[in-house]
Amino acid sequence: MAFAKRHIRVTLIDADTGEPIAETSTPPAELPENFQGYCTLQVGDATWEVAVAEPTMRREYLQTGTLRLQVRKVESVSIPINESLYSLPTRADVIPEVDLEKSKTGLNILEVVEDDWRQIEILSLEVGLQVAQCISNIGEVFNESRNAAGCFTRVHVRSELNQPFPSPALKLKEIAAELQGGSLAAPEVNATAGPVEFQGLSYRNLGGLIKNGFALRTKESLYIYGTTNGVFVTTLGLLRCRTAIRPAQDAHCIAKLMERHKLMLVDWCNRQMISAESAADYICEKVAYQVE
């Protein structure tokens, strides 16, 4: 097959069988800037969920001109017009505003899906009671509003938590300093470099940058993001992601940071409260995953 110049050669592989599905020539503008988090791709009349992308970032597949995607077909389901279904049982009550005057073009940024905002979150132990109540409310959604296909007829909006950090104490530079031992590394720089912050944080498929947002990528490919008030961290989350190796060192550094600042890890969709003592193992097993 002859491919058009400057197009990306995209190979689709069945994620379950390993068999090739199709090969297409696609303009880069029609592909995501990255394949982090949940992502789908339209090919002809079919929609495919991307399980694994090699490489994951646009700047990488622009260099090689090739992109290999392990995918699963998204089966369409007829839904009554008066019935809305949701893939997630909960979402944050507020997402940060976007500064539309700040362009993300040409910047090394981290993009998050709006519904993924703070789904895996680090919070102060001070809000433990509110977290427990919130998890109970999410449990009601699982028990009362989940259909046979695993979708939800309603979501719980997490309004119980006005402030994840009622007594601000954690600074962004402390996160980078703690992770220095795990060596944060910018994707475009030497993999053994020290801590590097992304140049911005944004929502996928939306322009502009999230106000007061920050994002970090660790050497072992964990993604840490959130917002600050200029001095202290006001929200702090982890992005579920694929890593080449078990990120034990970086996960241990995050757990130490949690212990020092009396923090907990909460995986809202899985209704899990995780202590600093158990955080490293949970991050390695549930937040990051590796492909055999």
Image (spheres, rainbow, N blue to C red):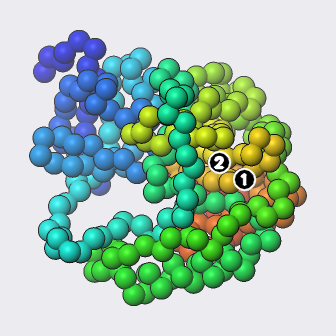
Provide residue 197's location: percent of width, then percent of height. 68, 32
Residue behind mark 1: 234
Residue at the image position 66 percent from the left and 41 percent from the top = 212
Task: Identify the disc placed on residue 286.
Answer: none
In this rendering, the answer to whether 60 lies above or below 49 is above
Q: Secondary structure at mark 1?
A: strand
Place residue 204 in its image quadrant: top left
Provide residue 103's location: percent of width, then percent of height. 50, 26
User: Which quarter of the rendered picture does the N terminus lie within?
Assistant: top left
Q: Amino acid at mark 1?
A: Thr
Whether residue 249 is visible here, answered yes or no, is no
In this rendering, the answer to whether 187 lies above or below 13 is above
Assess disc 2: are there few (<14), some (14-19) or many (≥20) residues with their C-alpha within 10 Å of its C-alpha. many
Residue at the image position 50 percent from the left and 70 percent from the top = 157
Provide residue 11's location: percent of width, then percent of height. 25, 33
Residue at the image position 55 percent from the left and 36 percent from the top = 99
Whether residue 166 is visible here, answered yes or no, is yes
Q: Amino acid at mark 2?
A: Gly
Q: Are marks 2 and 1 in contact (CB under 8 Å)?
A: yes
Upstream in the sequence, badge 2 or badge 1?
Answer: 2
Residue at the image position 14 percent from the left and 16 percent from the top = 2
Residue behind mark 2: 226
Provide residue 49's location: percent of width, then percent of height. 30, 50
Place residue 185 in its image quadrant: top right
In this rendering, the answer to whether 145 lies above or below 265 is below
